[in-house]
Image: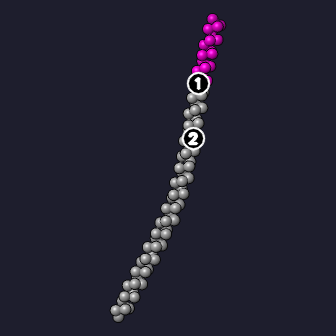
Amino acid sequence: MFWETKARNQERNMEAIGKEMTRLEILSLQNDAQALALKDVEEENESIARDAEKLRQETDALKSSLAHCDQELSRCRNKIR
């Protein structure tokens, strides 16, 4: 009787350990998937940041060009007068 009870308890413990291992494996797979998704989001974020910086530089260049055109227009107006 003692050994039968001990064997049943060990069997239950083994089942519990197996279930816990399965649960942890599933969590590990989910974590891996989330890490991969996060990596993709981080790469996209870096790309967007580079694009934003490029747009800022282009905007600054266009503002400078516009300022130069405004100066040239003023000079031409002054010549006409």
Q: Where is residue 63 in the image (x, y as percent from the top left)?
A: 58, 25
> According to the image, label 2 marks what residue?
50
Residue name at image x 57 percent, y 41 percent: 50
User: Main SS of the magenta segment?
Assistant: helix
Image quadrant where one finds the C terminus: top right
Q: Residue 50 in magenta?
A: no
* Circle 1: residue type: Ser
The magenta segment is: 63-81
Label 2: state its secondary structure.
Answer: helix
Answer few, some or many: residues within 10 Å of disc 2's Cα (few below 14, many 20 plus, some between 14 and 19). Answer: few
Quadrant position of residue 58: top right
Q: Position of residue 30 (x, y in %)?
A: 50, 63
Quadrant position of residue 64: top right
Residue name at image x 37 percent, y 92 percent: 3
Q: Position of residue 24 (x, y in %)?
A: 46, 69
Check the image and name the residue furthest to the bottom.
Answer: 1
Tell me which numbered mark, 1 or 2, is placed earlier along the sequence.
2
> According to the image, label 1 marks what residue?
64
20 shown above or below 67: below
Image quadrant where one finds the N terminus: bottom left
Answer few, some or many: residues within 10 Å of disc 1's Cα (few below 14, many 20 plus, some between 14 and 19). Answer: few
Residue name at image x 37 percent, y 88 percent: 6
* Circle 2: residue type: Arg
Check the image and name the residue furthest to the left.
Answer: 2
Q: Residue 73 in magenta?
A: yes
Label 1: state its secondary structure.
Answer: helix
Question: How far separated are the C-alphas under marks 1 and 2?
Answer: 21 Å
33 shown above or below 52: below
